[in-house]
């Protein structure tokens, strides 16, 4: 697969892997990427609600997008947000 698909109650979203950065990044990079946009259900340039959450004062080490690597077969997962154990960062993880 070459992207991440969001399926919700009467809702659908798709972000190609090329539209978002995986790994450690600053908040601005994350909220301008495709993953943040489909999680927020927006087609705007920036995922504004998520930008409000990812404040550098609260998360000075940025955002770490984990486990969103391409897969050979479709899999069912849930995306979640959590504070990083490394301290000062916010993780966006696929469970």
Image: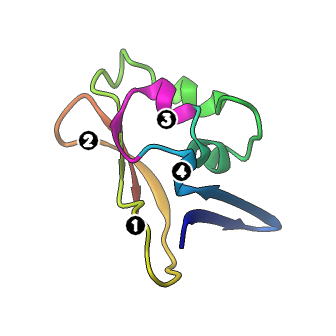
For marks 2 and 3, the one nearer the N-term is 3
Q: Give me the C-alpha separation between circle 4 and circle 1.
A: 21 Å
Residue name at image x 48 percent, y 71 percent: 77
> For this view, does 10 lie left or right of residue 70?
right
Q: Give me the C-alpha separation between circle 2 and circle 4.
A: 25 Å
Give the farthest residue toward the bottom.
Answer: 73
Q: Is residue 28 magenta?
A: yes
> For this view, does 45 lie left or right of residue 92?
right
**Above or below, 56 relative to 31:** above
Q: Which residues are magenta?
A: 22-31
Task: Examine the image and state in which quarter residue 26 appears.
Answer: top left
Query: What secondary structure is marked by label 1?
Result: loop
Give the farthest residue toward the top.
Answer: 57
Q: Position of residue 60 (x, y in %)?
A: 30, 21
Q: Give me the C-alpha separation between circle 3 and circle 1.
A: 19 Å
> Which is in the foreground here, disc 4 or disc 1?
4
Q: How many marks?
A: 4
**Above or below, 55 relative to 63:** above
Q: Give me the C-alpha separation between circle 2 and circle 3.
A: 16 Å
Label 1 belongs to which residue? 95
The residue closer to the viewer here, 3 or 63, is 3
Q: Are marks 4 and 1 in contact (CB under 8 Å)?
A: no
Q: Are marks 2 and 3 in contact (CB under 8 Å)?
A: no
Label 3 belongs to which residue? 30
Quarter holding the C terminus? bottom left
Query: What secondary structure is marked by label 3?
Result: helix
């Amino acid at each position: 697969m070459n992207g991440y698909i969001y399926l919700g109650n009467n809702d659908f979203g798709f972000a190609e892997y090329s539209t978002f950065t995986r790994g450690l990044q600053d908040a601005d990079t994350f909220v301008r990427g495709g993953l943040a946009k489909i999680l927020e259900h927006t087609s705007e340039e920036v995922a504004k609600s998520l930008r409000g959450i990812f404040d550098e004062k609260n998360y000075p080490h940025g955002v770490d997008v984990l486990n969103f690597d391409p897969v050979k077969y479709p899999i069912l997962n849930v995306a979640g947000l959590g504070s990083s154990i490394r301290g000062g960062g916010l993780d966006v993880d696929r469970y």
